[in-house]
Image: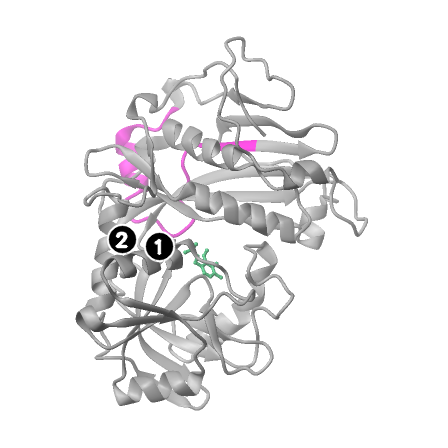
Amino acid sequence: MNQSLLLADVTAPEDVTAAGVAAPGRISWTRTPLPASDLATAAQIAERCAQPAFGQVFTEHMVSARWSEDRGWHDARLRPWGPLVLDPATVGLHYGQVVFEGLKAFRQQDGSVAAFRPADHARRMRRSARRLAMPEPPEELFVESVRELLAQDQRWVPQAPTQSLYLRPLLFATDMSLALRPSRSYEFLLLAFVTEAFFGPAAPSVAVWICEQYTRAAPGGTGEAKCAGNYAPGYLAQAEAAEHGCQQVVWLDAAEHRWVEEMGGMNLFFVYGEGAGATLVTPPLTGTLLPGVTRNTLQILAADLGLTIEERRLTVDQWRADAESGAMTEAFACGTAAVVTPVSRAVSAEGSWQIGDGKAGPTTAKLHALLADIQRGRTPDRHGWLDRIPSAAAGSAAGPARTIAP
Ligand SMILES: Cc1ncc(COP(=O)(O)O)c(C=O)c1O
């Protein structure tokens, strides 16, 4: 594998060649969108988006790009959504050399569309890829893919204030070989689907199951990478959670099974105290939990509000004691899909306890509202988190090939 490419930092700006020919070392882009006559009508889109189940109402296009040892990143395409043809020996299917991301785009107050922190998700995908010995997708390729897909499919970005467009970048190994070594070829894909608030508008808070039997991640493992193999092992625990009347699983550390780490697809925050004097506690990034972009966003917003932020470890026993004494006033989970979700009750093999009064507390509600307002352009984006898509580019027809730096 070409290590110099894998580790190269990408700083060169996007370049467009008039002739559409890729300069050496640059990625060529091809756009082949559906003909205008085949695009869904506004009424069809509205009908499909009326009640979108998570991950099922996809837009009409996707982006793909490839990596090979001899060519590096190449062949970036904006193309109609469609099935992949995979050899049964495609190595990613067998050995799990697969990483992905999840970010969102929002309809803005002024009618335009913006993606939230795409460069940060790009950087996390690069770290995940590095952990799985995969070539790191250049930040420009990632961000440009988001822009291309949003420019083409922006009619799918919902107007409804509870909905958004979820973007799913995926990178998988494509060698047709079952040799137990890193693949020598890869495919990057970007898909998009319309989503409602993750738990639905009717589920304002969740009860969580504290899982002691299974673990999600161990030191030295892949907990801080967003790799496919981290997720299916949680399904059994998720079923256990449902049996105990809980919507989500809380994962504990692998060694002692007593330190709170995170949830299946969300990071956790605990609120102590109230109002301007509140302290926000979240477990530190020890390598076994995913460094959430939402987690980081909320830490910054909380600091803006003058709250105290602490990263420190918390045991399950302490969680229970602090909730029962009233020192802990609120708890919430956060992530791209679930945004900010209050945690009202925790259940473990030893018993259950309520946090606060069982509803979304004021600090949780304030942070949630602030985040949503920034994401939807209702309040100024002081941290430069929104990547706005020029509306003139909406639904653009096939254009010349363009090139970007690798
Ligand atoms: C295991 C896990 N933890 C936390 C998160 C939250 O991360 P983010 O806020 O970047 O979506 C996710 C979602 O990506 C996740 O899968």
Compared with 356, 111 (above or below) is: above
> Where residue 3 appears, x then y in whole percent?
71, 40
Task: State the residue position of label 1.
Answer: 297
Q: Residue at x 57, y 74 (%)?
A: 215
Does residue 301 show up magenta in the picture?
Answer: no
Report whether the residue tagged 1 is closer than 8 Å to ligand 1: yes
The answer to which of 88 and 395 lies nearer the viewer is 395
Distance (Cα) linking label 1 and label 2: 8 Å
The answer to which of 309 and 29 lies nearer the viewer is 309
- The earlier-in-sequence mark between 1 and 2 is 1
Regarding residue 223, the answer to whether it shows in the image is yes
> Where residue 342 appears, x then y in whole percent?
29, 68
Q: Residues within 10 Å of mark 1 (few under 14, many from 20)?
A: some
Q: Residue at x 63, y 49 (%)?
A: 130
Q: Residue at x 27, y 30 (%)?
A: 42
Q: Give the amino acid type for the residue marked by disc 2 in the picture.
A: Leu
Q: Give the amino acid type for the residue marked by disc 1 in the picture.
A: Thr
Does residue 50 show up magenta in the picture?
Answer: yes
Task: State the residue position of label 2.
Answer: 371
Q: Residue furthest top?
A: 19
> Where residue 200 appears, x then y in whole percent?
29, 58
The answer to which of 231 and 117 lies nearer the viewer is 117
Q: Which residues are magenta?
A: 39-64
